[in-house]
Image (cartoon, rainbow, N blue to C red):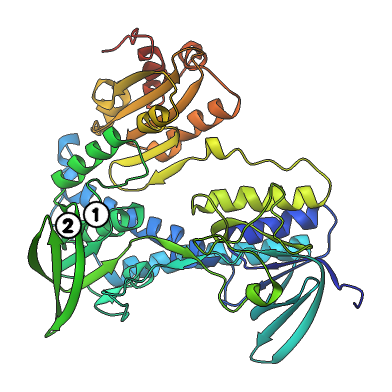
Amino acid sequence: MADPTFDLVIIGAGPGGYQAAIRAAQLGMRVACVEKAPTLGGTCLNIGCIPSKALLESSELFVHTAHGVTSHGIKVGAVTFDLEAMMARKTKVVTILTKGIAGLFRKNKVEWIKGTARIAGANMVEVRATEGVQQIGAARILIASGSAPIELPALPFDGETIISSTEALALTKVPQRMLVVGGGAIGLELGSVWRRLGSDVLVVEFLDRIVPGTDKEIGAELKKALEKGGMKFQLSASATRAEKDGDRMRVTVESGGKTSVEIADVVLVAVGRRPFHEGLGTDIAGIALDERGRIKVDEHFATSVPGIYAIGDVITGPMLAHKAEEEGVAAVEMMAGLAGHVNYAAIPNVVYTSPELASVGLSEDDAAARGIPIKVGRFPFIANSRARCMDDTTGLVKMIADAKTDRILGVHILGPHASELIAEAAVAMEFGASAEDIARSVHAHPTLAETLKEAALAVDGRAINI
């Protein structure tokens, strides 16, 4: 083997890959990051988290301006939107952030190698680009290649009428009717965007509930809120066939032994994502996979092949950008002999609908499955003074604590700015806090964060404001 050119070569410049590259460079490693896309940031920054949140913000602002300001005594005329300008703003946000990563690479002396990577051995990466093929030596290789949308055999993507989340972020006109297959975060968020802009949205979900990975009670409350906003749902149902009907699609939906046909301009298939490592040479390198096609790793993120590591969506665990970020940093810190750390019990999950749903830790069902006795505290936003001032009172905070130790096991928030509020719960759980710890902590008044304090008090039945 020739002397490696780099201490670490990272495949993929998504959140996990680019943060791992920067941290490794901070630790003194010579780092290269290979990315096949023309910009850095991976799915999250280019065709996922960031553009979707930009459109969610724009569409929510449109709805709020058109319908939500009159109660504040603000009078406006006819409110319209410019979809082209909305999309241009989304693109600008993405461009600024992806260029920011390129700047961070330059600052930290991370070499960005453009092209498609293939593992040519435990210490060699082959990169294929328009200029040709080059071999890059590496003392270590970190796979951070992310994930791709799952395609259903009965609903193959055509990029126009049967689309994935990628195309749903770039529609040039508002569909009159959108059928969303999948009631998880991606389907609900993108369905919300187009519902707010005027589309008739029907969500078809195979299970008997939406957001199945979250607390059942909170998920049911989110469904009610979305229905109030005009979104429709068909649960315990599956889309089994789709065929062209002029410019529209005829989708066959089966539920409870009955069959119906739904007509839609666009069918958004959002049933989840799969680990992506096609073409990387994982099979040739002998890297072990699990039954779901994820790369097997140990507690140091090492694969079955010495010198090759993996993080993020290609390994087990929730497919979340911040989970990949933490794993990337932890992996390179452990490579450097430090104590890298990821607490999988305290990883927040957010659905950026309106209201937002955010959760961390165990649900009631999770606790029951583990045989853990619990105490539960709830506090509604309708009883919170700041939410009243904002005229945004839908939802509640639900705190689950161990009945014996009072340690917080899970927090679930449905309501305004839940994505920001959940951070307090995540930090509390990281430090092993009890419900009493939050109940005794002084929270500024009036703030939405007081709902967490009140929910913590409610764990012992002593909430003040309900």
* Mark 2 and mark 1: Cα distance apart in space: 8 Å
Between 66 and 247, the residue placed more toward the observer is 247
The type of residue carrying mark 1 is Phe
**Is there any visible trace of residue 356 in the rendered image?**
yes
Q: Residues within 10 Å of mark 2 (few under 14, many from 20)?
A: few
Q: Are marks 2 and 1 in contact (CB under 8 Å)?
A: yes
> What percent of the width, then of the height, locates residue 146?
55, 64
Q: Is residue 145 above or below residue 418?
A: below
**Could you say which quadrant of the image residue 263 lies in?**
bottom left
> What percent of the width, then of the height, locates residue 21?
71, 60
Q: Which residue is mark 2?
A: 79
The type of residue carrying mark 2 is Val
Q: Residues within 10 Å of mark 1 (few under 14, many from 20)?
A: some
Q: Is residue 454 above or below residue 388?
A: above
Q: Secondary structure at mark 2?
A: loop
Q: Which residue is mark 1?
A: 62
Seen at 33% across and 11% down, the residue is: 463
Seen at 19% across and 52% down, the residue is: 236
> What percent of the width, then of the height, locates residue 214?
36, 40
Seen at 52% across and 50% down, the residue is: 317
Between 303 and 391, the residue placed more toward the observer is 303
Q: Secondary structure at mark 1?
A: helix
**Could you say which quadrant of the image residue 170 lies in?**
bottom left
- In the picture, which quadrant includes the C terminus? top left
Instruction: Tell which circle, 2 or 1, labels the residue nearer the N-terminal end.
Output: 1
- In the picture, which quadrant includes the N terminus? bottom right
Between 316 and 434, the residue placed more toward the observer is 316
> What percent of the width, then of the height, locates residue 416?
32, 36
- Pair 2/1: label in front: 1
